[in-house]
Image (cartoon, grey):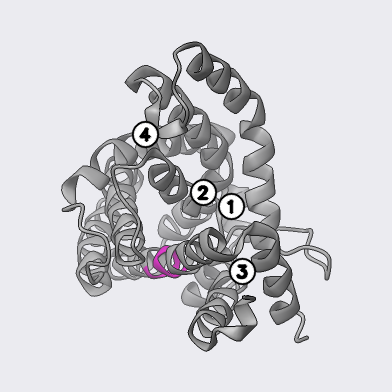
Amino acid sequence: MSIQQDPVDYKDLKAAVALLESPSVISKISHLIGSPIEGAVKALPASVAKKINGAVEVALHKAAGTALWSLNNKPKTLASPKLHKFYAATSGAIGGAFGFTALLIELPISVTIMMRSVADVARSEGFDLNNISTKQSCIEVFALGGPSKIDDAAETGYYITRGFLTQSMQQLSKELAEIAAKQSTKAVSNYTPSQAAKWLAEIIEKVAARFGIVITNKFAAQIVPVIGAVTGASLNTLFTDFYQDMARGHFIIKRLESKYGYEPVKNEYINIKNGR
């Protein structure tokens, strides 16, 4: 049966396309502060941008290590998006009120809240939070929604990003598969803790390179002189809301792919995006 023959699944796919092909979070930041953000980003010293990129990777590592553990692993549990947005707004207000140093301190907290929110969405879509592939998919969400110069009828920003991550992981996957074969294990979920940690660390490094661009834009917005605690809270709420949407779309797609297959879902996704 094709996905078009199931009205519920087809409706879910259309909803996922609308979420995943929405304007980037950087565009939404510019809209929130009322002006383009590019000038503020260019004004950041190179040393600051470097610190931010390093802090992003550390924050993702910490978030991946704690956020999923803080949720009960009960697939199909209703998500709590408003609660996570409240937590994010609170941490953002603190970071916005005390300047750049506080923003770096606040970053791991806000990223952990967002990661927990993403995992909450994954759980609500029926995914097992103890499965390493679910953890990988939660991390992947933070690579979505950033700027992309390639977007045409043959491809989409969403699938471009997934393809980038897949290609980046092919070599490591081969290495770990060979190790698993020698140990008579059959799946990624059966990797040893050290192998799984290596897998996730590699994913985080790739995702951090993309997510760091987004966070740099967020920091630039928050250190503009007229920006204070209120906008710090608003930015964190915007970020959490955005990545909740990315997570919802991503895990709907993953769920449908497990039922219909990768290529059929991708092809229909592109058809919907292009109005066919």
Q: Is residue 226 visible?
A: no
| First in sequence: mark 3 vs mark 4 | 3
Label 2 close to label 1 by CB (< 8 Å): yes
Tell me where the magenta segment starts and ends, as one range.
241-245
* Cα separation between marks 4 and 2: 18 Å
Label 1: how many Cα within 10 Å (few below 14, some 14–19, many 20+): some
Q: Is residue 143 above or below residue 87?
A: above
Residue beneath disc 2: 216
Q: Which mark is residue 61?
A: 4
| First in sequence: mark 4 vs mark 2 | 4
Asked which quadrant contains residue 183, the reply is top left
* Cα separation between marks 2 and 1: 7 Å
Instruction: Tell me which secondary structure the magenta stretch mostly adopts.
Output: helix
Residue beneath disc 1: 41
Q: Nearer the viewer, mark 3 or mark 2?
A: 2
Q: Nearer the viewer, mark 1 or mark 4?
A: 4
Q: At 71% across and 78% down in the image, what residue appears?
A: 273
Between 219 and 193, the one nearer to me in the picture: 193
Secondary structure of the residue carrying numbered label 2: helix
* Cα separation between marks 1 and 4: 25 Å
Residue 244 highlighted magenta (yes or no): yes
Q: Which mark is residue 222?
A: none
